[in-house]
Amino acid sequence: RLACSNCKKMVRFFCYHCQCLVNEGDRARIPQVKLPVKLDILKHHHEKDGKSTAVHAKILAPEDTTIYSYPNNPITIDDPSRCLLLFPGPDAHTLEQIDPQSFDRVIVIDGTWKQARAMARTSPELNTLRKVTIRPRTTCFWRFQQDDDAHMATIEAIYFLYREYYEAYLSSASPNLTATAMDYDNLLFYFKYFYRMIQNIYRANRKKTYCRRHQAGYI
């Protein structure tokens, strides 16, 4: 662990609070992702920094990602008609159903599902936005949750959104499909690292309990 140059907290790899690398020398050794549309992450202020994966996007795609603390740091949406909210529901559409020229900004909520539902329903900045959804998938997140395994970590949802953006709008036009697709795969750089680290710890010690609600086969 090293001290964050801003807040002086002892952290590993990056500072969740300051949203920066703890060692800028690592910048050349981690992938940098260029996103086709801007990403705004609305993080519930009760969501614990150490639990959140939203900061992964800020570290890996710093030029295109902004994180706001809700409701302490309000988000300003200049043109709601050109903004999509990633949130499931009967009124949500997949990217294949949305004109790519009709939006240039995506908002993702970071919080528990209870917090996210309340934010989407009650926030005047969010409840009028068009909703986009991603295809159902199974999470690989290692933290225990009460919901089923279709409920993903924030960075997983962000990754699949941009992967589906590529598949819907860019793949047929790209002369180098593999390289472009791999660029979005890099959004999971830290997620993959932590996933493998935790898997290795618990596979090496099968009797280790992940949490008090640990279930057989959870890890």
Image: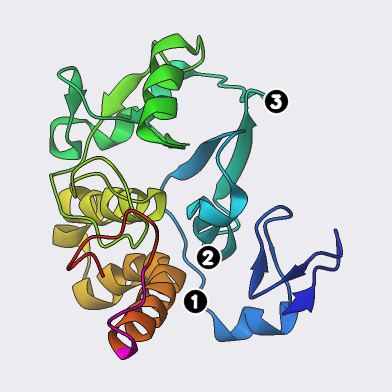
* Amino acid type shown at disc 1: Pro
Q: From the viewer's perspective, is the residue at label 3 or at label 2 nearer?
A: 3
Residue 66 coordinates in the image, percent (x, y): 60, 44
The numbered disc on residue 203 is: none
Please state which of residues 125 and 167 is positioned toward the viewer in this rendering.
125
**Mark 3: which amino acid?**
Asn
Q: Which residue is mark 1?
A: 31
Q: Are marks 1 and 2 in contact (CB under 8 Å)?
A: yes
Compared across the picture, whether 216 is left or right of 114 comes to left
Alpha carbon of mark 1 to alpha carbon of mark 2: how far?
6 Å
**Which residue, given by chain and number where applicable, does mark 3 sit on?**
72
Stretch in magenta: 204-209
Magenta-highlighted stretch: main secondary structure?
loop
Q: Check the picture and name the quadrant holding the N terminus.
A: bottom right
Asked if the magenta segment contains residue 103, the reply would be no
Work out which residue is located at the far bottom of the displayed protein and give it: 204
**Residue at 57% across, 86% down:** 29
Hey, what amino acid is under mark 2? Leu
